[in-house]
Image (cartoon, helix red, strand yellow):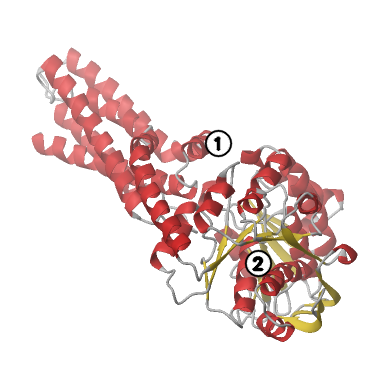
Amino acid sequence: MQTLIFLFSACWLMLCFIKLKFNLHMLQIEGYKNQKYIDWISAHKNKIFTKNDRIYSIIMIINTLFFMLAATGAEEKNLYPYAMAASLITSVFLIINTRKKDEAKKPLVMTNRAKRLILIAISLTVVDFLILIGIIYFISGNIVRYFPLWSGILAIVYLFSAYYVLGANYIAGPIEKNINKKFYNQAADKIKEMKNITSIGITGSYGKTSTKFAAASILKEKYSVLNTPESYNTPMGISKIINSKLTDEYEIFIAELGATKIGDIDEVAALTNPKIGILTSIGPCHLETFKSIDNIMRTKYELIERLPDDGVAIFNYDNDYVKKLADKTFKEKICYGIKNIDDTDLFATDIKVGSNGSRFTLCIKDMGTVECETKLLGEHNILNILAGAAAAKVLGLTLDEIARGINKIESVEHRLQLIDPGTGAIVIDDAFNSNPDGAKAALDVLDSFAERRKIIVTPGMVELGELEEQENEKFGENIAITCDAVILIGRKRTEAIHRGLKKKAFNEDDLYVVNSLSEATEVLKTLTRAGDVVLFENDLPDTYNEH
């Protein structure tokens, strides 16, 4: 019986470990933010208490009641081995069937922080296990006889084990804060001591990453440039690059600065010490945490406030919110745009946007004009290029150098990236973090593929606060105008898009609603044919899965 107790205990701990690891993954996706993780738990009870978990707990509780009652009525019969065997078999069955699901889009990364958290969470679990066994032994002196009781309690503990991850994050908070502060201060001191480095900070509700890579491509025509990779835009992500990559061989450092609340931009701007600040856009992204557009404006403007007296602010004058901030700025500034060219210092004319890229005339006051060509898709990408060209003007590049750099800009992965999978169909990958302006721009790009059947795959837009339903419904209306077939991912979360499609009388026979990206891929296999164009617009993280 000791062997059965040991095997059951080992199985229970394994189940807890599996569940802890899954919930650590969700916490990591939520940026290790306790409140965001709590909100996720509240919104996804079906993932915290899965069907298998509930069945397991019910069976274990029934097992507890049955054997405890049976033992009182038949004390001469030794029912304990049967109770243990039933609990063990149930646990093994759950281990075998636990979370048979699609592979994660963004797998759990076992960073040092993640390792610390999983170790603390497991320790909390083991401590509670030992406390329970200790209490049973202290009261009864016989853990074998009361096995059905404590195994049933452990089943309930397992059901709620997601909260051990939350507890671990609270416990580790001061430790992580000290570690982060050390790396942050090290990076901030390092970049301030590098007198030959010109730092450029880029912020905005959207367009940051594309602008960063465009600016880097242009500036490399004259300078040695280091930019933060991918979407590294947090204090720790940027600190990591400064500490490990930034050396005296570089002359320019470009960082995008991300934010989800007031004060975030000031923190990363203080870290990167920018001399040039670029404000690409302001819109309803992360409105759930910012609460208002005014808060977003205030936060993004923290970058401009951090610029030194001899710094230069660069503004997208086509964006109404950014325009307001530009107009109140008295530091040296450059305004760029496509629409308001009479009021801008740098603009594009004669724009020709096609399915293979764009051509335009770049006009820079006090410098002249130059013909430019880019492989990037969409008019909005020309705006991102103009921001990079404005930085190049500040740093003394010639028109020819700027044009050469523009020609060399490569599309950023998952941002209107044109892909030929070799099937005869064309794929436009715009899977990264959709927003209302970006979604409309993506549909405009899709529409440029004349005489081709157009298919969109999308879960819609998120983190738009109270505007989310309205914007997704409008998105659905625009989809109906542009697309021939639609695949929506997530029945609940795409209801607003569906309403928009109905408003424009979209043919329901050409609408497919699936639960996951993998299911959407299966639909595409039977739906697409040579000559089709497929747009993947937004790809939500695993925390938004509905299955």
Q: Is residue 191 left or right of residue 73?
A: right
Nearer to me, 117 or 250:
250
Picture residue at 21% right of the left edge, 25% below the top: 132
Tell me: residue 163, above or below residue 153.
below
Residue on which disc 1 sits: 43
Q: Work out whether residue 292 can be spotted.
A: yes
- Disc 1 element: helix
Looking at the rendered image, the quarter that the N terminus falls into is top left
Picture residue at 66% right of the left edge, 53% below the top: 304
Q: Position of residue 123 (x, y in %)?
A: 24, 38
Label 1 and label 2: CA atoms lie apart by 34 Å
Amino acid marked by disc 1: Ala
Q: Position of residue 223 (x, y in %)?
A: 56, 79
Q: How many marks?
A: 2
Sequence order check, earlier mark of 1 and 2: 1
Q: Is residue 177 left or right of residue 273?
A: left
Q: Position of residue 235 (x, y in %)?
A: 48, 52
Q: Is residue 293 left or right of residue 92?
A: right
Nearer to me, 16 or 390:
390
Q: Position of residue 6 (x, y in %)?
A: 14, 38
Mark 2: few/some/many CA within 10 Å (<14, 14-19, 20+): many
Q: Work out whether residue 103 can be spotted.
A: no
Amino acid marked by disc 2: Thr
Nearer to me, 25 or 54:
25
Tell me: residue 225, above or below residue 174.
below
Tell me: residue 426, above or below residue 16.
below
- Disc 2 element: helix
- Residue 211 tag number: 2
Q: Is residue 13 left or right of residue 349?
A: left
